[in-house]
Image: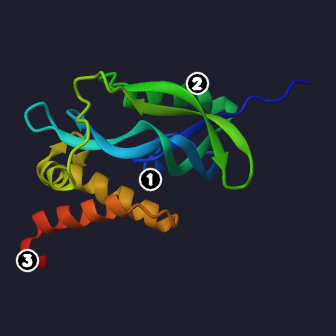
Amino acid sequence: MGERPEHWVFAYGSLMWDPGFPVAEMVPATLDGYARSFCLRSIVYRGTSETPGLVLGLEADPGAHCRGLALRVAEPDWEETLSGLRARELTTNAYAELFLPLALDDGRGVEAIAYVIRRDHDQYAGPLELHEQARIIAVAQGGRGPNADYLFNTARHLAQMGIEDQALDELARQVRGLLHPGGG
C-alpha cells in the first residue's frame, strides 16, 4: 500500500483566521526564504480599483523566515478546497501558486501550497513606508469589508500564536491612530 497523499496549505495572513475550507490539522510552521509584507494592492476584497487597499503577500527574501500556520486538508476535501483557494487567491493573478517546504513546529517537514506575490504584477505595491501603508489601510474597504479589519485580525492571530511581528504591530497602532485620532 502506498502512503496516503497529504495536502497542506501555508497560511500567513487571512487564511490563518478565515481559511474558508475544512482543516483536518493545524500546526504552527516556518517558511524559510520568505517574508510577510503588505505589498499587494487589493482591488477586490479589501479595496476597490478607485481606492485600493493593501494586503499581505509572501515576498522572496533569502534571509527571512515567515511564521504562520500549516493547514492540512483531508483527501476527500482537497479537490474542492484547491478550487476554492484558487478562486480566492488567484482572482487577479497577483500571486503565484507554489509548493514550498515548511518546517512544522512538531518537527515534521511538509510541502505546502503557498501564494507568493508576483513582483511583475501591476498590483505589486513594492516596499512602502509604514505611514504610507497605514494611510492606505485606514481608508480602504472592499468586498470583504474594511482593510483595517484585515490588519487587526491578522495582528490578533499572530499575537495569539505567540508570533512577534513588530512592524505589523506598529502598523496596527498607526492605523488605529488614524481611525481614532486622540486615542478615542
Q: CA distance from mark 1 to mark 2?
A: 21 Å
Chain-order first, disc 3 or disc 1: 1
Percent coordinates x, y for residue 155 in the rendering: 37, 61
Amino acid type at image mark 2: Glu
Of marks 1 and 2, the one in the foreground: 1
* Label 1 element class: helix
What residue is rendered at 20% in x and 50% in y? Answer: 129
Of marks 2 and 3, the one in the foreground: 3
Chain-order first, disc 2 or disc 3: 2
Q: Residues within 10 Å of mark 2 (few under 14, many from 20)?
A: few
Q: Is residue 39 left or right of residue 162?
A: left
> Residue 46: in sight, yes or no?
no
Q: CA distance from mark 2 to mark 3?
A: 49 Å
Percent coordinates x, y for residue 21 in the rendering: 51, 40
> Residue 141: in sight, yes or no?
yes
Q: Is residue 23 left or right of residue 46?
A: right
* Label 2 element class: helix
Cβ–Cβ below 8 Å for labels 3 and 1? no
Amino acid type at image mark 1: Trp
Above or below, 103 relative to 3: below
Residue, disc 2: 79
